Amino acid sequence: MEWAVIHERPCTFERLLLDPMMDLLQADSYGVTLLHRLSGQGLVQYMKPLIRRLKCAGIDPFQVDHSLLTPLHYAAGRGLIQGVHCLIALGADVSSKDHHGNTPLHLAAVTGSHWVFAQLAQAGASVNSEGRFGWTPIDQASISQHLHAVEELKRLGS
């Protein structure tokens, strides 16, 4: 399947999705699935059919890796707005927390990806959610010296 992605063959990818022998949730040694990798690259044209296929099979597409990161954590942390939009539209949990208690909004704040904040907040992400150490997204943006992110979080009510 990854060959089809690497060589930009969406039709081949979609045909492979229909193969009953294909393990669509095969994870690497870190628990990272194909959807995690696609989300971290913002490859929406492959994410959508994969999520739909998993849902049709009765499988939750939004599996966590060994660090409890969801595909939405990957997309938000990279500031991939189309990927974030796709995942939210198809049912990703904007409040999911990794093993540090960080939500996708926390990861976007750490990287200064302020352009995805509003989309996450509109979908129900709390701008004041605390991680395991009591840090909120604005704390993480501030520590990382992302001033535009701090301003955007203030605008959203943090």
Image (spheres, grey):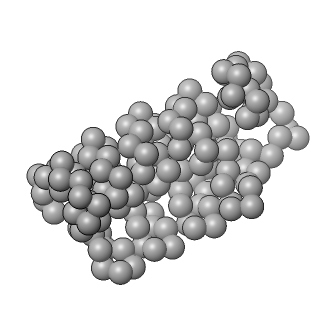
Image quadrant in which the C terminus is located: bottom left
Q: Is residue 92 visible?
A: no
Q: Quadrant of residue 19?
A: top right
Q: Describe residue 23's horizontal placement relative to residue 74 as left or right.
A: right
The percent coordinates of residue 125 (x first, y second) are 31, 58
- Give the farthest residue toward the front: 145
**Residue at 41% across, 33% down:** 82
The percent coordinates of residue 16 (x first, y second) are 79, 30
**Residue at 49% across, 68% down:** 98
Q: Nearer the viewer, residue 52 or 66?
A: 66
- Give the farthest residue toward the right: 21
Position of residue 6 relative to residue 20, above or below, is: above
Q: Nearer the viewer, residue 104 or 54?
A: 104
Image quadrant in which the N terminus is located: top right
Q: Is residue 21 visible?
A: yes
**Residue at 22% across, 63% down:** 142
**Residue at 38% across, 43% down:** 79
